[in-house]
Image (tube, grey):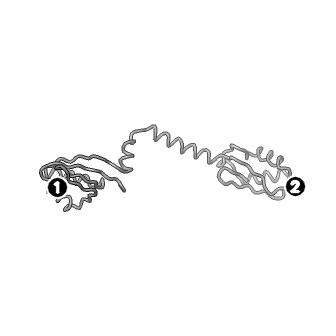
């Protein structure tokens, strides 16, 4: 996986053969150090299997000292079902709230009182907290014009949780 890195420490008698094997097999190593009879390096997580096979072949001891990257972070929380349920719950709440009417605005009207328009809108089902996918806006426009004869035109649209 992109960016996943593993730090290794190798000890044994045939370190030079192991290092030569890494080069020959195309294993990319960074931060290489040889100190006190041990070789340490950082390599991509995908190359760890090759490095372990080479360690067996050259009879050296390979130990993983550090694992970094998203791959290993997700692996640590793999069986934490509470976290997954929490994320799922948050997504469901976002979905639910994004489909509710939060605000009703009445614009472009001078002849009819806004309170009268709001009252009719409530009667036909357009009010704060109403479920947006259950509203037929074209039918509501027609009902609004029929309920208030002074209205010559009515247009109802929604953007997110706002109905205008």
Specify the quadrant that holds the N terminus: bottom left
Q: Is residue 128 left or right of residue 93?
A: right
The residue sitting at 28% across, 58% down in the picture is 30
| Disc 2 secondary structure class | loop
- Tell me residue 12's x, y (percent): 14, 48
- Tell me residue 57's x, y (percent): 14, 52
Q: Nearer the viewer, residue 150 or 64?
A: 64
The residue sitting at 28% across, 54% down in the picture is 42
The residue sitting at 79% across, 51% down in the picture is 144
| Relative vertical location of residue 86 with respect to residue 108 in this rendering, above or below | above
Q: How far apart, in angstroms, are the residues tagged by discs 1 and 2?
A: 89 Å
Disc 2: which residue: 111
The residue sitting at 43% across, 38% down in the picture is 81
Looking at the image, the residue that sits furthest to the left is 13
Disc 1: which residue: 18
| Disc 1 secondary structure class | helix
Specify the quadrant that holds the C terminus: bottom right
Local crowd size for mark 2, using a 10 Å CA cut-off: few (<14), some (14–19), many (≥20): few
């Amino acid at each position: 996986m992109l960016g996943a890195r593993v730090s290794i420490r190798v000890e044994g008698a045939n370190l030079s053969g192991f290092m030569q094997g890494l080069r020959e097999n195309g294993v990319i190593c960074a931060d290489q150090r040889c100190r006190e009879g041990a070789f340490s390096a950082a390599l991509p997580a995908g190359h760890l299997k090759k490095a372990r096979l080479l360690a067996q072949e050259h009879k050296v001891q390979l130990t993983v000292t550090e694992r970094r990257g998203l791959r290993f972070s997700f692996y640590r929380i793999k069986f934490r079902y509470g976290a997954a349920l929490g994320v799922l719950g948050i997504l469901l709440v976002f979905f639910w709230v994004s489909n509710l009417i939060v605000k009703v605005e009445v614009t472009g009207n001078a002849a009819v009182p806004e309170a009268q328009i709001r009252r009719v809108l409530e009667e036909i089902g357009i009010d704060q907290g109403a479920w947006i996918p259950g509203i037929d806006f074209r039918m509501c426009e027609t009902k609004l014009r029929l309920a208030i004869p002074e209205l010559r035109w009515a247009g109802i649209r929604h953007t997110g949780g706002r109905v205008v």
